[in-house]
Image: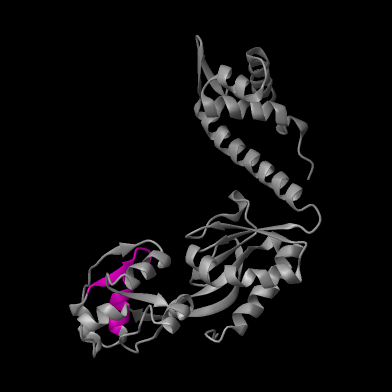
Amino acid sequence: MTIPRRFLPSLSLLTAFEAAARTGSVTTAARDLNLTQSAVSRQIQALERQIGVDLFIRERQTIRLTAAGESYAREISEVLRRISTASLNIRANPHGGTLNLAVLPTFGALWLTPRLGDFLEKHPGIQINCVSRYSSFDFRLDSVDAAIHHGPAYWPGAELTFLMKESIIPVCSPALLRAHEIRQPSDFLQVPLLHLTTRPDAWERWLAHQGIDDVAVHGMLFDQFYTLTQAAMASLGVALIPTIFIQEHLQRGALVAPYPGEMVSDGAYYLATPSERASYPPLHLFSQWIVDQARADHSVEE
């Protein structure tokens, strides 16, 4: 589809508008863009004429966005950011392509990152950029090619590829276990319990899985599994943590499992990809690779 020229303002007009909208001043925008104040004013006026909408209210020596201008500024700022990111990526890796990947912080740090060297060795022309995301988002509004998702097999506007299920287990430090006798599930009600903010009912669900229903438990809250793990190792309490994140800590004795109550989480890990990006070569190669890595993990069962 050919877009009419009047709906495609030049980059110079858009950058002048974005700078003025961001700074709230034509003078400051001109300084940021290394232009004269009159040049920025002319570009903004030309943009308004082209799209047929007043973007600023001009009051003596000041300007402020109209309601339409505020909405337009949000859209244009995001578009310019994505253009800048794309230019930076292609400059950093002009031959092999770049893959922008959104990852859950702990999964990225403890499971994915230690394995990425294998992918880069097999595909040396591809550059991977990782950004942290805690929840699903609209791929159309973000310069991300794929994301690691945990939860149900649902992400609007994206295709999901199964990676692995997740088993969680209660763990604590050896010192805390020496201070508290834990022989059966009900004993956990007598010790400090640590919680993850994104899974506030995890302990209730685990206890119900062990046959203890209708209980409410409280304790310290943490927003990432990494800090939750550190708190458990610091003897602040017992935490429910996915086994894939703590194998090393268990092996060296920094954490211990006081009770063999492993439970499979309701959700699973998936690679989420927008349908229109499925054929992008770096993403296609990464998708094949991460599925192979997940299947090779001894803790994975579909």
- Answer with the quarter of the image where residue 190 lies: bottom left
| Residue 77 percent coordinates (x, y) | 59, 37
Marks counted in the figure total 0
Range shown magenta: 192-208
Q: Residue at x 60, y 55 (%)?
A: 139
Q: Is residue 204 magenta?
A: yes
Looking at the figure, which quarter contains the C terminus?
bottom right
Q: Is residue 229 magenta?
A: no
| Residue 41 percent coordinates (x, y) | 63, 16
Outermost residue to the left: 190
Q: How is the image coloured?
A: one colour
Q: Residue at x 70, y 74 (%)?
A: 288
One can see residue 152 in this view? yes
- Between 20 and 227, the one lying in front of the other is 227
| Residue 43 percent coordinates (x, y) | 68, 20
| Residue 83 percent coordinates (x, y) | 69, 42
> Does residue 132 sit above or below 112 in this rendering?
above
Looking at the figure, which quarter contains the N terminus?
top right
Side (left or right) of 82 relative to 150? right
Q: Residue at x 41, y 63 (%)?
A: 224
One can see residue 287 in this view? no
Q: Residue at x 47, y 60 (%)?
A: 134
> Does residue 216 sit above or below 73 in this rendering?
below
- Answer with the quarter of the image where residue 217 lies: bottom left
> Does residue 183 sit above or below 280 in this rendering?
below
